[in-house]
Amino acid sequence: MRLRFAPSPTGTLHLGNARTALFNFLAARREGGTFVIRIEDTDRVRSDPRHEAALLADLAWLGLDWQEGPDRGGDFAPYRQSERQAFYADALNRLRELDCVYPCFCTDEELARDQAEQRRRRQNPRYVGRCARLAPVESARRLRAGEPAAWRWRVPPLGSLGWNDLVYGPQHQEMVNLGDFVVCRRDGQAGFLLSNIVDDCAMRITHVLRGADHLSNTGRQLLMARALALTPPAYGHLPLLVNRGGTPLAKRTGATGLGALAEAGYLPGAVRNYLARLGHVYAQDELLDLETLAGGFDWTAINRSSAILDPIQLDHWQHLALRALDDAAYDRWASQALGPEAPPGLPALVRDNVRNHADLVEWRERLAGRRLPSAAAQETLRVLDARLREYGVVHAGEGTLADFLAGLRTHHPSAFPSRQVYPALRAILTGSLEGPELARIWDWLGPERRRLAFRSIRAAPVPPAPPEAVPPGCPSGQPSG
Ligand code: GLU
């Protein structure tokens, strides 16, 4: 089996294309097949070598290892479409000989006018066939005169096409709905439909998993493969990924890029487990390594409805991936966010409470820096029993949390039930009602920070806390009174 991922280097790798890459990789890996990377850089204007380098770096980060590609060659090199023009020119010549294509001299303005008219009549936009009706001598004369022409497929008016989609099952397209599509553009550049099928066949690709946005291209590409007597791959189309609101995910609408996730501290193992389950189910719900993900991959089990991108799920896998790190690896991960100056012990303290680097920075600010209490903590502080504050200012520097609570209860018998005193202490010490076990926070803060936290409460009117006020749990600031 030979599978490929064929990105266009026109932007960053978003989660949608990363999932496509992963699925092709897993399918190849499962069968001991070959995974190929081909760069589809025929759009000269939008393609950029920097995007190509970033795409390859993102794929490598995700742990997808390819056996053939632009950076490492292979039996079917080159792996960049911009370097494969001769293949497309050959194919076009052959199609001209077979009379499958005809030159189309229509200008962009004419085509735009046709489309506007079709929209007005509520018809599907498709080529009106103006140049299909030109007499061959007339076309030949215009070509000889050097008039720029695209080449269009002459789709027969009758008949239909079918294939068995690996994901969607039997598919059927009527010729009449295909329209005379462009095979080669006016600028001489092979169109996507031609270069893509020519390369898949030349590179002996056996299976293609690609986005369902390509479903409508597949019939046209099978038609071309048949005419050129090429063996096409088997196609499987992946339902699109949508955001929670149901809107499709597009490169240019700021969809989450893989690079941005890596920068935010997400681990490749978390992203892999998340993507592998977008529209595909695994029997095991623990964090799986790449080999196990490949072993359990089954394209016949891919769900046919759109998969919803859910950041909560991503955080779930990240939680498991962080947990799976050994202490040294976790410390390295934390120091990427906090730098070498991380307060000692802080990353370990909050290990179960962070999902990404921003969470770590937030905890550092809560416990060892300046940060306003959360809204919920402010509310708790607003109704804080003054006796707790007073007791803390005097005694927070002493002993363990258990000692403190025992003393508090001796001092104010039955005034402080646990369900009230714990959130209050969290709010005072951390400015948050959530977080690590309170006794561990207590110990980590140490006497000085705890005392300051209690004093800051008295100093800072809450709520609303003015921006310049020293929030509770921020002992590095100067209490103002
Ligand atoms: N370059 C195409 C894309 O990025 C590849 C489509 C395909 O996989 O066939 O959508």
Image (tube, helix red, strand yellow):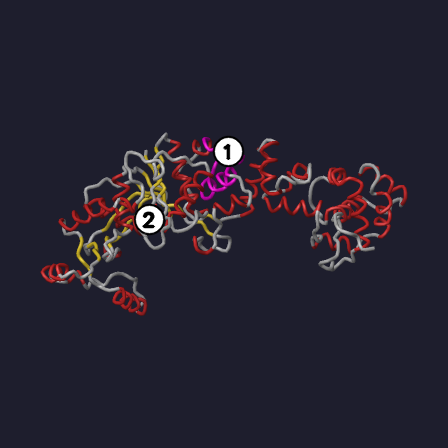
Which x, y percent locates residue 111? 26, 65
Identify residue for label 2. Answer: 41
Q: Is residue 112 left or right of residue 451?
A: left
Identify residue for label 1. Answer: 288
Q: Residues within 10 Å of mark 2 (few under 14, many from 20)?
A: many
Vertical comparison of 33 with 238: above or below: above
Q: The disc labelled 2 sits on which kind of residue?
A: Asp
Q: Tell me, yes or no, whether the highlighted magenta stretch contains residue 287.
A: yes
Closer to the camera in the image, 285 or 20: 20
Which x, y percent locates residue 409? 87, 42
Q: Which residues are magenta?
A: 268-291
Q: Tell me, yes or no, whether the highlighted magenta stretch contains residue 4.
A: no
Q: CA distance from mark 2 to mark 1?
A: 34 Å
Q: The disc labelled 1 sits on which kind of residue?
A: Leu
Closer to the camera in the image, 34 or 180: 34
Q: Are marks 2 and 1 in contact (CB under 8 Å)?
A: no
Closer to the camera in the image, 78 or 404: 78
Vertical comparison of 131 with 14: above or below: below
Q: Residues within 10 Å of mark 1 (few under 14, many from 20)?
A: some
The residue at 20%/60% (across/down) is 148
- Can you tell which quarter of the image residue 142 is in? bottom left
Which x, y percent locates residue 343? 68, 40
**Disc 1, SS:** loop
